[in-house]
Amino acid sequence: MLRDSVRLSLDGVPHSIDFDDVGKTALQVMGIRDFYHILIWAICTTENTLTAHVVLEKNIDHEQQKKIICGLKHELQHRGIQHITLGNRNGK
């Protein structure tokens, strides 16, 4: 309990989250070319949050972008991340 409290107060990656798995998961979603500047922390003892930047493949229309981002959020939620903020752009 003390270890979890210290980790929470220092905004460390929650022990229940595998940081490397999060990145690999994102890159396995069709349409995602890059996933970087990943920050993961607990906002309380039961909820985790993530912010990251996503680069999408070239020539993806707006509707497809929304589907890709929704799919990524769904996968991340299955890995214990409840609050997700993503900045995205199309690849060049």
Image (tube, grey):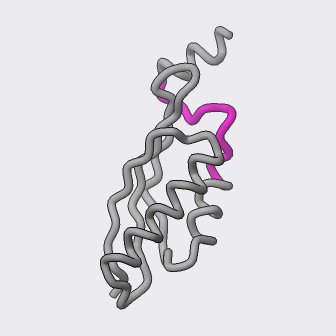
* Residue 39 vs residue 77, the one in the foreground: 77
Residue 49, percent across and down? Answer: 47, 38
Q: Position of residue 32 (x, y in %)?
A: 50, 75
- Hey, which residue is sitting farthest bottom in the picture? 59
The answer to whether 55 appears left or right of 13 in the picture is left
Question: Considering the image in quadrants, where does the C terminus appear?
Answer: bottom left
Q: Is residue 47 above or below residue 36?
A: above
Please name whichever residue, 33 or 62, is drawn nearer the observer in this view of the structure: 62
Magenta-drawn segment: 10-20
Residue 48 placement (x, y as % from top left) = 52, 34
Task: Judge whether residue 3 is colored magenta.
Answer: no
Q: Give the quarter of the image for residue 28.
A: bottom right
Q: Nearer the viewer, residue 88 or 63?
A: 63
Q: Residue at x 45, y 70 (%)?
A: 67
Instruction: Characterize the magenta stretch by its predominant secondary structure.
Output: loop
Q: Residue furthest top?
A: 2
Above or below: residue 89 compared with residue 57:
above
74 sits left or right of 61 in the view? right
With respect to residue 64, does 50 lie above or below? above
Left or right of 21? Residue 54 is left
Q: Residue 17: x percent and y percent?
A: 65, 40
23 shown above or below 80: below
Q: Residue at x 42, y 77 (%)?
A: 56
Tally the marks.
0
Q: Report the residue at 49% width, 34% height from top.
A: 41
Task: Identify which residue is drawn at 57% across, 20% down.
Answer: 45
**Image quadrant occupied by the N terminus:** top right
